[in-house]
Amino acid sequence: MRRANILIVDGRVDLMEPLVEVLETQGYDVTTVEDGASAIRLLKRKYFEIAITPPRMPGGNGGLDFRVLKWLSPSTAVIIVNSRGGKEESEKIAESEIEAVIDKPFNVKKLLDIVNSIIETPSILVVQQRVEDGEALRNILVERKCRAVVAKDGNEAIDMVRDSDFDVLLIDANTAGNGGMAVLDAIKKAKPNLGVVAMIDYSSVKFVRDFLQKGASTCLYKPFLNIERLVQVIEGIRSQKRSYPTPIVGEYPHS
């Protein structure tokens, strides 16, 4: 089992003790807090793979919306523990990129199964030249049981990498002429062991050597990639990252 940090936000942390015990028995490091303000302070100084929270975290002025957790740490998986809330809260949950919703009273084994499944799922940051292309790729990856987040530009990607712990970065090689190499430089300085896959087409083949020299693990051709091959590459990078702190040998197809 992969060791991971889990944050639980609940106004009655004593009621979470059975869940905490089960998670710790599985080897997870669990931290519990009673309100949203405490959760935010923790997220600013420690990375959590998973946050388990109600839709509105307890606290003053009606509490904090759960979406602030995703804003602070995009690669943190969020599990909503939902009471019988109003229609507005249900709509917020449905519209958000969260990993799971479980209703109270919940079955501890079911929640543990959800946690285990998330921990074994690759976390991916997508940087495309066009945001809508990145969103389309994210949706494809999510269908294949990956956790994927899209950065709207290179600067946001750098910030997201610094604040989170992604397994793999998928970057469009066509961004190279628009500061993409500088973005990759900054990202690799922030997280040297982050696996990088550069997505190239025939117009960006000239950048392959540069991407590999800058630390990309591999380059794959589009349009569009053999998605099953892409998932295999992601899994390979992730497995190697978990076993060895060195990048895999770069490879790219030849015409």
Image (spheres, rainbow, N blue to C red):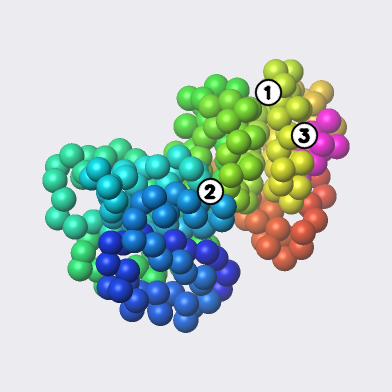
Q: Distance between the residues labelled 1 and 2?
A: 30 Å
**Magenta span of residues:** 210-217
The quarter holding residue 9 reads bottom left
Between discs 1 and 2, the one toward the N terminus: 2
Placement of 118 over or under 207, stated as above or below: below
Residue 146 visible (yes or no): no
Placement of 42 over or under 61, stated as above or below: below
In reply to whether residue 216 is colored magenta, the answer given is: yes
x and y percentages locating residue 141 in the rendered image: 50, 44
- Mark 3: which amino acid? Asp
Crowd band around label 1 with a 10 angstrom C-alpha radius: few (<14), some (14–19), many (20+): many
- Mark 2: which amino acid? Lys
The quarter holding residue 190 reads top right
Nearer to me, 220 or 111: 111
Placement of 117 over or under 222, stated as above or below: below
Instruction: Look at mark 1 in the image and give the residue it sits on.
Output: 175
Instruction: Look at mark 3 in the image and give the residue it sits on.
Output: 185
Nearer to me, 225 or 186: 186
Nearer to me, 81 or 224: 81
In which quadrant of the rendered image does the N terminus lie? bottom right
Circle 2 sits in a helix, a strand or a loop, which is it? loop
Circle 1 sits in a helix, a strand or a loop, which is it? helix
In this picture, residue 154 sits left or right of residue 246? left
- Mark 1: which amino acid? Thr
Instruction: Look at mark 2 in the image and give the residue it sits on.
Output: 44
Q: Looking at the image, which residue sits at the far front?
A: 60
Residue 159 visible (yes or no): yes
